[in-house]
Each structure stands twice: as C-alpha cells, then as structure tokens.
Image (tube, helix red, strand yellow):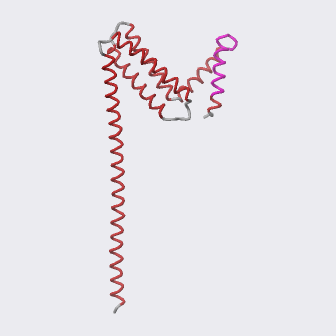
Amino acid sequence: MATEGTKHVIDSISVLTVVGTLADILPPIAALVTIVWTGIRIFETKMLLELAAANAAFAVIKEAVSNGKDLWDAGGALTEYFSNKNKIAQEVQKKGASRTDLEEFMALEQLKKQEEELKELMIYSGRGGLWDDWIAFQADAKRKRDEDAKAIARKKAKRRQQIHDWFVGVLVGAAILSGVGLVGYIFYYIAVNSK
C-alpha cells in the first residue's frame, strides 16, 4: 500500500477533485473516482469505521427522540453507539501508524459533543435521574470489563506459570534420572574393572 505521504497527496487531490466537480470544472466521473478513493481510505482506517458506526447510531437515537419515542426505544442504537465509542477510545490508546493525532483528537471531540447531546436528551426526554443512573451504570460496566480483563490476564499468567512449572519439573526429573544413571554407571564401571 502507499506511504502516508502519498496518501495525503492523493487525499488533497481528492478534495480538489470534489471542489472542481462541484464548480463544474471537472466531469462527474472525477467525483466518482474521489468517492472510490475516500471509500478505500475509510475502509483501511478502522477508527473511522467505528466513528461512522457511532455517528449512525447517534443519528438513530436523535431521530427516535425527535419522533417522540422514548430513549429506551432506541436501546439497540444506544448499545451500538457506546460500544463503538468504547472501541474508539481503546484504538486511540493504541498508537498506530495509520492515524494522526489530529484524527484521534477530532474523533474524540466529536464523540464528546455527541455525548453532551445525549446527556441533554436523557435529562429532558428521559425520566428524572436517568443521566445520573446512566453514568453509574457506565462506571459499573467499565469496572466489570476491567475485572474481566484482569481475570483473563491472571488466567494467562497462571497458565504460563503451569507450563513453566511442568518444563522445570521435566528438566529436574531428567537431571535426576541422568544423575542416577551416571552414579549407576560409575558403580558398574568400578565393579567391572575391579576384578
């Protein structure tokens, strides 16, 4: 695949192509090429996919509330939004070569803005105390995820320790058997040569 510098040059050309197409300077086929390139860039950038999914889920939540539905009617979208928000936060903590600090910052800022809107929706469209209950639920869910991650890490460490213990046991057993065999051979050698 192309280097980051090459990708940025093609991204710039892509933007100029869109502007040229909108100004009727370039033919519509140029816009199609730009759309294909943008699709490739989005596909290869996992964080952008998760951001797009979070944005889509948020749009569903806003649409449901604006149509007079309760927040819990958009439960699936809420789950999708917060799941993708969590994935994005985890991706930002892992540094990768395909993202810039600006992309990470802008993604987190967009999520922060959406969460503020969601807070307002929960406060004004939900039952009393819904936002506070949601914050408490999120904290509890994060604690449980962290505990699960620690339990998995402990299991892996225990398994590594068991493998290590077995390996050491086999080596010690082999050393003892070798030692006993060597002592037996020495006695045998002495017995045979003393005659």
Q: 148 left or right of 50? A: left
Vertical arrangement, residue 164 with respect to residue 14, above or below = below
Image point (29%, 12%), residue name: 128
Tell whether position 148 is magenta.
no
Front residue (pair 9, 100):
100
- Image coords of residue 134 (percent x, y): 33, 20
Front residue (pair 139, 62):
139
Front residue (pair 69, 36):
69
Tell me where the magenta segment starts and ends, as one range: 8-26
Place residue 138 in its image quadrant: top left
Vertical arrangement, residue 154 with respect to residue 63, above or below = below
- Image coords of residue 42 (percent x, y): 54, 25
- Image coords of residue 121 (percent x, y): 38, 12
Place residue 67 in its image quadrant: top left
Image point (32%, 12%), residue name: 126
- Image coords of residue 60 (percent x, y): 41, 14
Q: 13 left or right of 193? A: right
